Amino acid sequence: MNTPLSLSGDGDVPLSFSNLPAELVDNVIDHLRGDAVALSASSLTHSSMRVRAQFHLFHTICFTPQRWSEYKELVKMSPHLGYAVHHLIITQPVSSLFKLESQDSCSFIELSKPQAERTAPLFPAVTKLQLTRLDHTALFIPLLRNVCDTHIVESIRMHICVIPTMAYVAEFICSFPRLKKLAISDLFTRDAYAAGRRKETSIEGPVPIAFRPSIEVLRFPSACTLGEVNSISMVKWLFERSMHVHLTTLEIIVARQEDAVVLRMVLHQLGPRLQHLYLGVEQLTEDASFSKPLTLSHSTSLRTFGLWSLKLHGDEGRPRPSLAWVPRLLMELNSSALEHVHFRLRAGGALPSDLGTLDWAAVNDILCEHRFDSLRRVTIEVLRGHGIKDVLWPHVKDRIADLYARRTVLYTQTDA
């Protein structure tokens, strides 16, 4: 029931929400974003508030096998709520990920069976998919078509998923014709830790392609993608099928010389189209020369350059990594558009003797050159390194004095 509100004063003046501009009502509701209780109350207060409040309440939802029937019934009663969902997180219990019996009521197996008749998806307006802790029974296009319209999805993130091969992922993403953003991390096979298993599961042989999406943002936030070589395997596969020609953002970690060669080829062809690059070099052997093929000489329009996985200390049984590639790539970079350089240091286990692993003085001299006059921020992010916490920043600050004087440096250190 819509009841008018009153403003007290010399007399009661009735104020009806229906007389307020819709823009004003929406603006008020927008300020409640993130407060589910307040949004729920607003949606029940007046019909003029309901649509905007429900937009925020249902914009992002987490979908599990247990909630299938609940959401199906809700959308049946209020079909417009299905259109409010734009960001869909699909996940399942960890137990279902590693025990996939067909009787398991917590998995998507039963839900992935063909439907007797074709029905509209529950959430037809979803443009962003986040797929977490899933396996092939959930990463199944007929199942996803019951949940969302695969023809309008623009962004996919796959995280902690169990899949057969990287070719499976390649075929999977080609079911989304409008896909623009793809992030993949921590993928495993069911026998990932079996003795004698061949770690490389790269894309080999033909892959069925339903559509050819044009990827604009491609991210591999971790090197753990069915072994070290598979991130670059996906990049190479997209490159060979011209699905990368509109790529503007790339995040990747290379671990072999072959990876560096492929990445050099990709960076060369992308040239000035690439605007944001986040690059890590994972040194797995004593040979630090494998990164030499890398060059940024063709990346003339970079606005952001992230240097990831900068280990100051070698893992157990491995040598201290060489970070000589960092100043070398910065020296080659000739982008007058560069605004942000982000160093992400991994200092776990580091000792004071490891402080000189990266030549900060060279970094300072390079970034202070006139070609980088557009540089607005230099972020130095340190992960862990509790043992050198008190000496690391003074060491770095002393060697980047010129850069620090420009008030562009942001230094952070976390124990994560």
Image: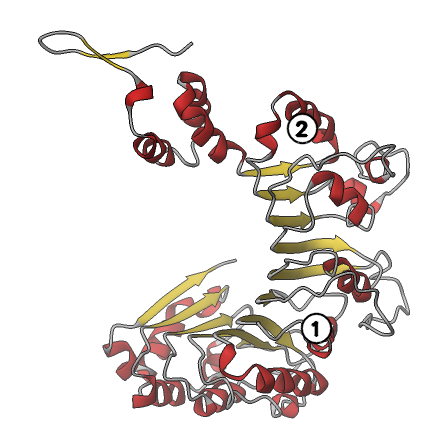
Q: Which mark is residue 238?
A: 1
Q: Secondary structure at mark 1?
A: helix
Q: Is residue 263 above or below residue 217?
A: below
* Residue in the picture at 51% in, 78% down: 273
Q: Nearer the viewer, residue 289 or 240?
A: 240
Q: Which mark is residue 71?
A: 2
Between residue 238 and residue 21, name the one nearer to us: 21
Q: What residue lies at 61% left-to-right and 44% top-to-bottom?
A: 126
Whole-number angstrom distance, CA of label 1 to CA of label 2: 36 Å
Residue 118 placement (x, y as % from top left): 81, 36
What kind of residue is marked 1? Leu
Image spot of residue 60 (x, y percent): 55, 39
Residue 369 visible in the displayed image:
no
Quadrant of the rendering where the N terminus is positioned: top left
Q: Is residue 50 visible?
A: yes
Mark before the other along the chain sequence, 1 or 2: 2
Element under disc 2: helix
Q: How many marks?
A: 2
- Whole-percent x, y for residue 254 in the image: 65, 78
